[in-house]
Image (cartoon, grey):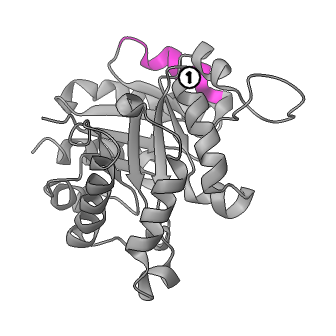
């Protein structure tokens, strides 16, 4: 049976005291999460701060991005080795906001994925269609194309998690229905089956305006193993509510 995971992507939010209080609040509730794993992905600048707070709590630490080179003249970038030395076990790759605002492509996702796995980081690879693509009936073809390009020449799926994040549901208040989300997760499970015999062990997360009041219904679907949470991860009560919804 696959474990459940709820990842909080704090994006470009929190100053030091906010990051500290948020992490402390989640740690105080960690004993209530059962077998569901909690993951916090704060801004780079707070990785060490949050890492110290969550140490030995069972809550995991992850980063929001990385670069595919080991070192060099890449101003503003962060390497996989830096993330490891800061205590990260996970890294988000190819988030829709990275694609939209910073020009990331399936090809750069592929490079970052390979580097993350090389350094023994678990990669949360994000895929998703925009509103126009969904309305045009292109969801399956877009997801399939993103999947094939992201995992081109790749075979080490033991450290991979995939997050389906419909772009039209991120920060908009809209949410894919449980059935819509399950359809895409089922597609992803089938695509994984073509790549690896571990297809039924790989976690598939849903991300897109997840809240405590819709999390239980979403997690009830057979191929949804957890969530990549944005806005709701910035309030202890909201994040804890989502965590609890996964164990009912």
Q: Nearer the viewer, residue 99 or 36?
A: 99
- Tell me if residue 133 comes above or below residue 95 in the rendering: below
* Residue on which disc 1 sits: 118
Please indicate, yes or no, whether residue 14 appears anywhere in the rendered image: no
**Residue at the image position 62 percent from the left and 38 percent from the top:** 112
Image quadrant where residue 236 sits: top left
| Residue 71, visible in the rendered structure | yes
Q: Is residue 244 rendered to the left or right of residue 47?
A: left
Question: Residue 190: horizontal and vertical position, in percent?
Answer: 26, 56
Q: Is residue 115 left or right of residue 183?
A: right
| Closer to us: 32 or 108 | 108
Looking at the picture, does residue 45 appear above or below residue 192? above
Please provide percent x and percent y for residue 6. Answer: 33, 41
**17 magenta-colored:** no
Quadrant location of the N terminus in the rendered image: top left
Quick check: 218 above or below 175?
A: above
Task: State the image coordinates of residue 171 (x, y, percent, origin top left).
Answer: 50, 66
Viewport quadrant of the C terminus: top left
Residue sticking out furthest to the left: 248
| Image position of 239 (left or right of 99) | left
**SS category of the residue bearing label 1:** helix
Residue shown at 40% from the left, 51% from the top:
163
Q: Position of residue 244 (x, y in %)?
A: 20, 42
Q: Quadrant of residue 136?
A: bottom left
- What residue lies at 20% left-to-right and 53% top-to-bottom? 223
Q: Is residue 210 above or below residue 75?
A: below
Please report the bounds of the magenta region as a residue range: 46-56
């Amino acid at each position: 049976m696959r474990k459940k995971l709820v990842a909080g992507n704090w994006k470009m939010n929190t100053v030091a005291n906010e990051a500290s209080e948020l992490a402390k609040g989640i740690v105080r509730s960690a004993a209530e999460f059962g077998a569901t794993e909690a993951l916090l992905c704060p801004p780079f600048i707070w990785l060490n701060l949050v890492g110290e707070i969550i140490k030995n709590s069972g809550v995991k630490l992850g980063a929001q991005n990385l670069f595919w080179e080991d070192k060099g003249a890449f101003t503003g970038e962060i390497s996989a080795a830096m993330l490891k030395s800061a205590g990260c076990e996970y890294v988000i790759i190819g988030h829709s906001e990275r694609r939209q605002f910073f020009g990331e492509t399936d090809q750069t996702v592929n490079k970052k994925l390979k580097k993350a796995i090389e350094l023994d980081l678990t990669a949360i690879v994000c895929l998703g269609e925009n509103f126009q693509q969904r309305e045009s009936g292109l969801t399956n073809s877009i997801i399939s194309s993103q999947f094939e390009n992201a995992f081109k020449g790749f075979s080490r799926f033991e450290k991979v998690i995939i997050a389906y994040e419909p772009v039209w549901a991120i920060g908009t208040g809209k949410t894919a229905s449980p059935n819509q989300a399950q359809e895409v997760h089922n597609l992803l499970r089938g695509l994984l089956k073509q790549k690896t015999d571990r297809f039924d062990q790989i976690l598939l997360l849903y991300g897109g305006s997840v809240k405590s009041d819709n999390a239980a219904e979403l997690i009830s679907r057979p191929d949804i193993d957890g969530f990549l949470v944005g806005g709701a991860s910035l309030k202890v009560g909201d994040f804890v509510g989502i965590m609890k919804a996964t164990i009912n």
